[in-house]
Amino acid sequence: MTLTLRPATVDDLMPVGALHQRSRVAAYSSFLPAEALADPTPEAMGRYWVERWSWERDDHRMTVAERDGRLVGFSYLGPDDAGDPATGLLNAIHLEPDERGRGTGRALMVDALDAMRARGWSRAVLWVLAQNGPARAFYERGGWTPTDARRDEHIGPALVSQLRYARPL
C-alpha cells in the first residue's frame, strides 16, 4: 500500500472536513463528552475548511495524504499566530482513525517541517490539547517541547486547555 503526499486542492476541502471531524471524535472521545464532539457535523467542518482556505490560501499550505488513492490524512501550516516572522505554525495534523501507527502522521510532520524550512522559518510552533496524551507523545518524539504558553478554548460546551509546543527548524 503506497502512501503519497500532495498539495491540497479546493476539491479536497469537503472530504478533509469530514476526515477532520472523524479524527477529532476518535482522538478526543476519551476525555471530552459526546455533546462536545457532535458539532460540527462532517459537512459543517467541510464548509469551515472551504471558508478558511478562501482566506488563507495565499500564506498557508495544506497537504493531503493518500493511501492507494484514499484520503487518509492532512496537515495545515502557516505563519505564526503570535506574529513572529521567523516562526511557522503547524495548525493541524489529522488522520483517519485507522491510519494511526502507520507512519502517515510522521510523514506529514516531516513534510510540514521541510516546508517551513523552505519558507525561511527557523522555528516551528503548534498548539495541542493538554489532555491529548497520544498527540503530545507523538510531537515529543518528533523533537517538539512544551513552552510556558497555555490557552483555554471551548470545544462545544467543554472548556479545554491547549499547550504550545516549539522546536527549532
Image (cartoon, rainbow, N blue to C red):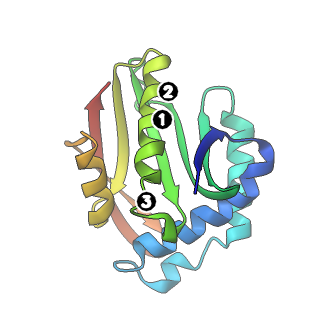
**What amino acid is at disc 3?**
Arg
Among the two numbered marks 2 and 3 on one chain, the one whose residue lies closer to the N terminus: 3
Direction from residue 136 to residue 82 in the image, left or right = right
Q: Secondary structure at mark 2?
A: helix
Q: Position of residue 2 (x, y in %)?
A: 58, 51
Q: Position of residue 26 (x, y in %)?
A: 47, 74
Residue, far right:
11
Disc 2 from disc 3: Cα separation: 22 Å
**What amino acid is at disc 2?**
Ala
Residue, far front:
1
The residue located at (42%, 42%) in the rendering is 109
The residue located at (60%, 75%) in the rendering is 39
Disc 2 from disc 1: Cα separation: 6 Å
Q: Is residue 20 visible?
A: yes
User: Tags 2 and 3 in contact by the CB under 8 Å rule?
Assistant: no
Residue 102 bears which disc, if any?
A: 3
**Mark 1 Cα-neighbour bin, 10 Å: few <14, some 14–19, many ≥20:** some
**What amino acid is at disc 1?**
Asp
Above or below — where is 81 with respect to 17?
above
**For mark 2, what is the residue?**
115
Along the viewing direction, whichever of 47 and 112 lies nearer the viewer: 112
Q: Position of residue 148 (x, y in %)?
A: 18, 43
Disc 1 from disc 3: Cα separation: 16 Å
Q: Position of residue 11 (x, y in %)?
A: 81, 49
Direction from residue 46 to residue 96 in the image, left or right = left
**For mark 1, what is the residue?**
111
Among the two numbered marks 1 and 3 on one chain, the one whose residue lies closer to the N terminus: 3
Quarter of the image containing the C terminus? top left
